[in-house]
Amino acid sequence: MSQHSHNNHNGYNSNNLRNNTTSLSIFTSARHNDTTIATTSTTAAAASSNNSHNSNDFAYPDWQLTFIFLICGLIILITILGNILVCTAVAIVRKLRTPSNLLIVSLAVSDLLVALLVMPFALVYEAKGCWIFGQTACDVWTSLDVFLCTASILNLCVISVDRYFVITRPFQYAMKRTPLRMTCMIVFVWLLSALISIPPMFGWKEDPKKDHCNITQNIGYQFYATIGAFYLPLLVMVTIYYRIYRVSSRIAEAEARSKPNNCQLQQPHQSHSNSLSLTPSRQQSQSQQSQQSSNLSKECKATKTLGVIMGTFIACWLPFFILALIKPFCHSSDACIPHWLNALFLWLGYANSFLNPIIYARFNREFRKPFREILLFRCLGINRRLRFDTYAEQYGPTSQDRL
């Protein structure tokens, strides 16, 4: 009996021990689950907080960000103002409304649109380090980037072709240099730019990456776009400008040889009879020669301006297009080419649109004086003042000016 009671007692204790152990395990498991849930909640909250914080952050420290916004913002502002100035000068100054200046207006419009539609988004993308405007906006922006930059480059190419025919075939080309022909050349430039920029919108591109917006690195398209938008126009421009330089040099040498002969007609030791022998027909011939010499001098100055523009164009865009041919062969463009170098060369190319109006203001007198008048808000009567200045330069000040 006692043995049986003892056994029952032992069994009762064992059951209690197992029950206590089970309860403890359940409590420990529940506590562990509560801890896990709390930890997970804390981690999720922290991640959410970090994501929220990062979405408002920029990719650079404050001082670098200030420098980037200052430099890029200045480029955008001056590009807009400078190219508006070019368009305004051609619109209101009568002597600038020539067929050749239609090409310059087309160049200014393309550069202006680069500053308005491309550069601001590029600045935000660079500052944030990610694309925040959506995939559709990305496709439109990259297409506009290629389209407008290509139009700017091709406008420079067409201007060089026009200048070549003016220098080498002045009389034949003068009859063909009509506003209609210039308009056709401008339409050709913009259509060709569209043919180069549109293909990615119809599928000739890679799958987009999240939070990234770059021109497609498809090897076939990159070769198609870079050759059509840069290397082929570059070859045409360099070849044409070399020929222009040779022709201009020959003209300058011919003028230098003819100057002593012209001066002999006006030497003081000549007799009175020789001076009387200058018939009206000969005087008219000399006047025509003087006018032709003046025209050639203007064309040579315009050629110099074109040379400066071409040199600037090559310096601005060549580094970017060299990288454009390298990047498609890199598995990761950031690993192959540093991001800062890629961004620097991109904005160096954009700076070409900023420099073109500055070059015209510095090297082309026909634009420099109207620019000054417009910036001083003296647009009223600008044609009369410019006409008087031109007369004074050619024939000296009038008697009223001397008084």
Image (tube, rainbow, N blue to C red):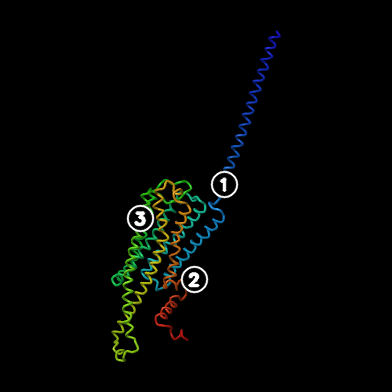
User: Which residue was labeled with disc 2?
Assistant: 375
Q: Is residue 173 left or right of residue 355?
A: left
Please report the residue visible at 48 percent of the width from the left and 64 percent of the height from the top.
78
SS assignment at label 1: helix
Q: Estimate the spatial distance between the alpha carbons at disc 1 and disc 3, rounded to whole Å.
A: 43 Å
Q: Earlier in the sequence, mark 3 or mark 2?
A: 3
Q: Are marks 1 and 3 in contact (CB under 8 Å)?
A: no
User: Which residue was labeled with disc 1?
Assistant: 52
Q: Is residue 78 left or right of residue 242?
A: right
Q: Residue 101, image x and y in percent?
A: 38, 68
Q: Estimate the spatial distance between the alpha carbons at disc 3 and disc 2, rounded to whole Å.
A: 39 Å
Residue type at mark 3 is: Ile
Q: Quadrant of residue 302?
A: bottom left
Please report the residue visible at 47 percent of the width from the left and 72 percent of the height from the top.
372
User: Which residue was labeled with disc 3?
Assistant: 227
SS assignment at label 2: helix
Q: Earlier in the sequence, mark 1 or mark 3?
A: 1
Graded by Cα atoms within 10 Å as few (under 14), some (14 to 19) or many (20 or more), the crowding at tag 3 reads some
